Image (spheres, rainbow, N blue to C red):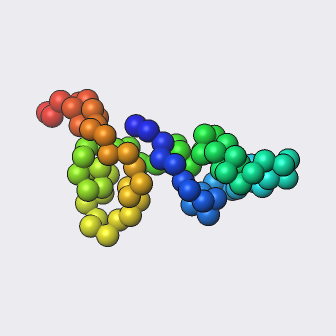
Amino acid sequence: MDNFVRNDISEFDDIASKDQYQRALGEGFSSEEALYFVNKRSRDNSRTPMQWDNSKNAGFSKDENSKIMDKINRKPSRNKCSRPNK
């Protein structure tokens, strides 16, 4: 599973990530550099649902209105075959 890249600080939920972004700006980094740092280190990456398969919501949700998986990488997942059906 890959982390997805957020293109704006407003896309982050993690308050520590937002603080890291502001500190990087305060230290003289550009907004692009600050966003790069946050994308690499944010705890939001661990909050992204597991991608179980290649369906619309990657097997995470059957809700047709869900947008939580819109930005994920759509590479084929090996997770669906990880556990045999019993």
Vertical side of 23 occupied by 79: above or below: above
- Residue 54 rendering spot, x and y as whole percentages: 24, 46
- Residue 68 rendering spot, x and y as whole percentages: 41, 59
Q: How many discs appear?
A: 0
Furthest-left residue in this view: 86
- Residue 85 rendering spot, x and y as whole percentages: 15, 34
- Residue 38 rendering spot, x and y as whole percentages: 65, 46
Vertical side of 15 occupied by 76: above or below: above
From this viewpoint, is residue 16 visible? no
Residue plotted at (40% across, 49% down):
72
Quadrant in which the C terminus appears: top left
From this viewpoint, is residue 76 visible? yes
User: In terms of depth relative to the viewer, which is nearer, 56 or 81?
Assistant: 56
Residue plotted at (64% across, 59% down):
9
Vertical side of 46 occupied by 7: above or below: below
Furthest-right residue in this view: 27
| 86 relative position to 46: left or right | left
Quadrant in which the N terminus appears: top left
Residue plotted at (60% across, 59% down):
8
